Amino acid sequence: MKSIFTLLLCLVLTLGLFACGKDAVTDSGSGNSDTADVSDTEGNTDTSEKTEDDQPKYVLFDPEAEHKFIGTDIINFSLVVYDLNLCDGDFQALADDDSCIIWEWKSREDPNCKLASKIIRSISGVKFRYSAYWKRDVVVACANFGWVGVIDYDACKLLWECQLPTGPHSVEMLPNGDVVVGSADGEGALIYFPLSAGITTSVHSIVSPSCHGVCWDPQAECLRVLGLNGVYSCIVENAGTAQGKLVKIEGSDCNFTGDRGGHAFTPVAGQPGVYWASAGKLWKYDSKTNTFSAAKSNLISGAIKGICSYEDNTVILSIAGLNKNNKYSWGSDGFRIFTRVMSEGRVKQPVDKVVNVVFKNQVREYYKIFPFTKDYQ
């Protein structure tokens, strides 16, 4: 009887050790590279989630998600909307023909555009918006040689234009349909047009040194403005009236550290209140903390003129002299595209795939690119 009891006790202990050993293997496996945090293309931490089959799930390039963007073609003096999804995985198709273009406004072919001579080589800022004033989808744009205009998207015809002094580099349409222009030349200026009141000329401006970017923040209901040394915020008092006035928010200045010359300025997709800001390097500006942080190292490049991103970690850049075939010093003869994909080999992990799209024979050349969306963020 004693021997039987001893045998049963040994059996219980053996089973217990086996169970503990099995648990230990599972725990050690939870820290392997497949489930480790991986920095994404936007400089964040991409934490994987487990799927039903216990495999990690990362945010990867999604060919079904929106990937449209709008660019300013300084060879053809036009505005062009591309759909990355029409490339079927071959991004060079963006440059080989026009099959990925879904919309184009050519300033020289629009009879409503009387100031086309102000657009040549300089079309610089553009956004896609819904105009509460015109009650339709519009494209609002500006050009460095002194032009700002609003285009009916569906009709592809100009609705309104205005001549300005040299310098416009960025433009924004407020939710009520008013327009704000950022101008870089001279002292630099932020200029306000209360179009929703039927007023087609500017009624107020403030000095804004080397102003290159302006975006409406719908959560804070203010403008975020990029200039020479960094970002500041601005409200519009008496919006939609002849008494409309731009007022800089006191204490809102956030300057670059060891950098200057702000240029590209667009929202970071999926992160409300956070913006891309290029200067000598590429930064992310967080309006909630009023701070800058460096973008992920592989995104950093000199001469970034335009940037747009998507929630699946896809990022597109226009970079002056990208492929060394540009006609103008500020022009990008192609696009640099980052997509998040899984690596090859035994150990799978998310990595950035980088492709340089090349426009040959100077058929097209871009200054700025922007996300093609009516959403402000």
Image: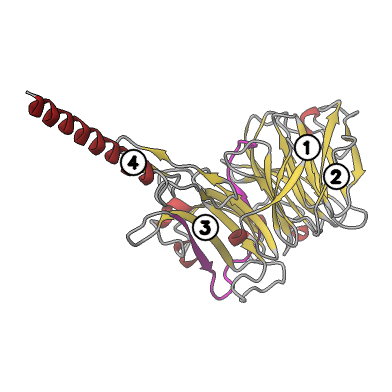
State yes or no: discs 3 and 2 in contact (Cβ < 8 Å). no
Residue 342 magenta: no
Q: Identify the residue under disc 3.
A: 338
Q: Identify the residue under disc 2.
A: 190
Whichever of labels 1 and 2 marks the residue nearer the N terminus, that label is: 2
Residue furthest front in the image: 2
Whichever of labels 3 and 2 marks the residue nearer the N terminus, that label is: 2
Highlighted magenta segment, given as a residue range: 350-377
State yes or no: discs 1 and 4 in contact (Cβ < 8 Å). no
Q: Secondary structure at mark 1?
A: strand
Q: Which mark is residue 24?
A: 4
Q: Position of residue 90 (x, y in %)?
A: 41, 62
Q: Please name whichever residue, 57 or 82, is drawn nearer the observer in this view of the structure.
A: 57
Q: Identify the residue under disc 1.
A: 223
Label 2 CA crowd tier, 10 Å (few <14, some 14–19, many 20+):
many
Q: Secondary structure at mark 4?
A: helix
